[in-house]
Image: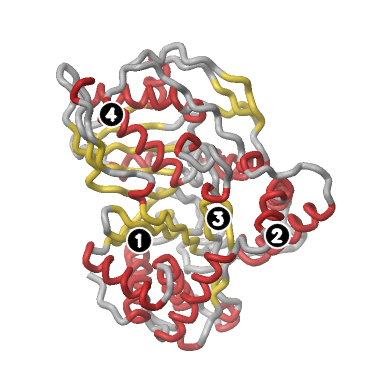
Amino acid sequence: MGSVEHASGLPDQPFSNYEQVYLNMSRAFSHLKKEHWGIHVICEIKHDAPPGTGTVKAISSAWTRLAAEFPGLRMVPVGREKHFPAMDETAWLDRTFFTSSNLASQDVIAQAKPRNHPSLYYLPTTSEVILLTQHWRSDGLGACMLLDRLFQILATNPTGPVRPNPPSPSLESAAGASSSSDPSLQSYARTYIDNFHARAVHAGGLPFQGDTATPPSLASRMDLDLSAGATSSLVSACKSQGISVTAAIHSALAQTVFSYLPSEEEKRAGYTTVMAVNMRPFLPAPYNSASHACQTFVASITPTVAYRRDDGPGPGSGSASSFLDSAKSLTHEYRTWHSGDKDMFMRSLHWIYQYHVEKLSAPPPPGAVRKPPSGVTLSSLGVVDNYLKGRYEGDGGAGGKGVEVGKFRFGVSMMTRQTILYAWTFRGKLTLSLSYNAAYYEESMVKEVLNRVKRGMEVGLGLELE
């Protein structure tokens, strides 16, 4: 591959308010040598290394070229500044590339510590490539696009000079947000954040083990996979009802959470979740493209699902009518949340995240006793194949060999009692994946939560999902 040893450094840049939210969250448990919201992507690959080299060497070379193409990958935080060092191939690989024949992917994730660099692991025994990256560096879809480019490089073995992409601006800057002291922007932002914190930040949800003093242990993840046939049936049933698959999952998740809430009072408050929204489609070119994969471009909405008495208790106990009513309302909200005041939202992002940082950093009111939040956040990656193609043709002339991704897994390291339900399809199969911390939930309960969500969709849509 082309030389990347002398890729130049770049001037330091400040972390924006938006980026500081993720930076602060990432470091919240650093005193325990744990990282909150650390992203992991696992891909099982098939790859024939070029003649005269091995897969380990080929992957490490592709990883080095990727870092030269994306300065954000090698960026390190220094205080509240982003430092972009010059590319040093040897130092980069020493700090960020690892291979092991003894570790399983779950061991890599469980043993991960807070770091200022991303990490790429190759496990030859299972042919798995694992990307670990901080949420302040990239979001989930961005991480998928970074691996997509890595596999393109691995397949084609390019030998030309590296053409680095420029560092990606923060979401506020990419969206054209204003930092002027405009009272209308400040008022909109204050109302938005006050509502966000009141509805979702401290929401309850699942019953957890331990008490308020119980520290986190291992970051864990459990997956529930549907077959291609069951996924196809689910998609068809959702289309016939005029709802999205994500809304069906969301409605079933709400019924599941209601089934665990102990009191009618808690249920009557409804189920509100923080739901990530991919902002790339709303950004101008080139920020909406894969050339800006190494950045976090997500915002949040907080839909509320109202409780009805036929929503619980017990798995799949909600009625079909309740399920469909909620799913149709959610589908409408997904499609219209930005209608009317999208421009105001985008222009207010600077103030929204300044107020968000202030609220997250503020001490609780005197005498306030809060039960630790244990809400379930829903985040849909959608059709992953749109961001990670999974099949890459080689370039025989350059010695590159094709790459194929056989299995895809995704999750984040959770250090709180909150959990995140991720949903995606890859190669026509739907996966529901719950990221959680093992200190607060046993595997048996996590499995039951996933099964209740699946059962809720079966009852609500009149299906049997394999």
Going 32% across and 65% down the picture, which residue do you hit? 447
Identify the residue under disc 1.
432
Name the N-terminal-most of marks 3 and 4: 4
Instruction: Report the mark closest to the observer, 4 or 1.
Output: 4
Q: Amino acid at mark 4?
A: Leu
* One can see residue 122 in this view: yes
Name the N-terminal-most of marks 4 and 2: 4
Instruction: Report the mark closest to the observer, 3 or 2.
Output: 2
Name the N-terminal-most of marks 3 and 2: 2
Identify the residue under disc 3.
213
Q: Report whether 52 appears left or right of 226.
A: left
Q: Where is residue 291 shown, x and y percent of the image?
A: 47, 34
Q: Amino acid at mark 2?
A: Tyr
- Answer few, some or many: residues within 10 Å of disc 1's Cα (few below 14, many 20 plus, some between 14 and 19): many
Identify the residue under disc 4.
154
Q: State the residue in front, 343 or 114.
A: 343
Q: Are marks 1 and 3 in contact (CB under 8 Å)?
A: no
Identify the residue under disc 2.
192
